[in-house]
Amino acid sequence: VVIGAGVIGMEYASMVNIVPNCQVTVIDSRDEVLPFCDSELTQSLKKIMRGHGARFLLGEQVEGVEELGSGKMQVHLASGKRVPADCVLYAQGRQVNTASLNLDVLNEGKGLELGNRGMIKVNEFYQTSVPHIYAAGDVIGFPALASTAMEQGRLVSCHMAGASIKTRMSGFPYGIYTIPEMGMVGRTEQELTQDSVPYECGVAHYDELAKGQMQGGQTGLLKLLFHPDTRRLLGVHCLGPGATESVHIGQLAMDMDRSIEYFIESVFNYPTFAEAYRDAAFNGLTRVRQYTD
């Protein structure tokens, strides 16, 4: 049983899910797994995991875990359900370890200003409430990724040395190492709809690509979200083999403010999963032309 359907919970759940004769149940109080991700991708991921026997109990509150002896446990839910388990993984977020850092001895005993869950508060230059002390990485909270932590560290060193600072932190990608992988950069359909931003989407399915067919009909998809008038990319979302790598193609195109025609005009190696960008762009433009011609 995995309690928590965030990144860590879903990564571990999907890994254990492919072990023969190992049944996985994912429990979360939210109504969807990975709620910040594109809903079409999360639905596809759940379908794949269910194909291996996974079970999802969403919108459920955990009241407690009971040890039954002989290595057996039972998870009690507020709804009255009881979920048997041989092992329970609790993956409901992380707690920063600032309490053991003796921060109170700094700043003449005043310590550093902390925020929610003990995270260290910083400004745009990653300076703490004591200007000559900086903080970066998970200890300052979102996005708490190794990739962004390294970039934050670089920006800290630049600010310390008085060097000019240039970064593209606003367009960082997510890589989720589920099986199969997920990668995303930019905005989701849910976010665009909520903000009343017009958009269209182009989709390519991995099992329709030569590479996917050569590898036994790989399950996966690439979705490009773009503005129907300017054709500028608004978001890239992929699920499938190498998704955490493929997403960088979309990231670079967004950084360069390219339209989806960029993928149609580009030549990709054949056969590759990268070709999905071209197919998705054709698919998206076809949809736009249906109501603009």
Image: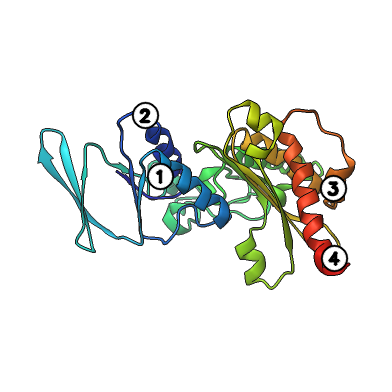
Query: What type is the residue that disc 3 sits on?
Result: Met
At label 4, counting other C-alpha atoms closer than 10 Å, the crowd grade (few under 14, some 14-19, many 20 or more) is few
Q: Secondary structure at mark 2?
A: loop
Residue 165, image x and y in percent? 78, 45
Q: Which residue is mark 1?
A: 50
In this view, the mark in front (3 or 2):
2
- Identify the element where label 3 is drawn: loop
Q: Left of 202 or right of it: where is 94? A: left
Q: Is residue 216 above or below residue 116?
A: above
Q: Nearer the viewer, residue 239 or 93?
A: 239
Q: Is residue 37 visible?
A: no
The answer for how far apart the CA atoms under marks 4 and 2 are is 47 Å
Q: Quadrant of the N terminus?
A: top left
**How far apart, in angstroms, are the residues tagged by discs 1 and 2?**
13 Å
Q: Residues within 10 Å of mark 3 (few under 14, many from 20)?
A: few
Q: Amino acid at mark 2?
A: Val
- The numbered dot on residue 229 is 4
Q: Give the mark, 4 or 2, whose residue is nearer the N terminus.
A: 2
Nearest-to-viewer mark from 1 and 4: 1
Image: 26 above or below 196: above
* First along the sequence among labels 1 and 4: 1
Kindly report the distance in space between the C-alpha atoms of the residues bearing marks 3 and 2: 42 Å
Q: Nearer the viewer, residue 282 or 274?
A: 282
Cα distance in 3D space between marks 4 and 3: 18 Å
Q: Amino acid at mark 4?
A: Asp
User: Of the numbered discs in the image, which one, if any, rests on residue 256?
Assistant: 3
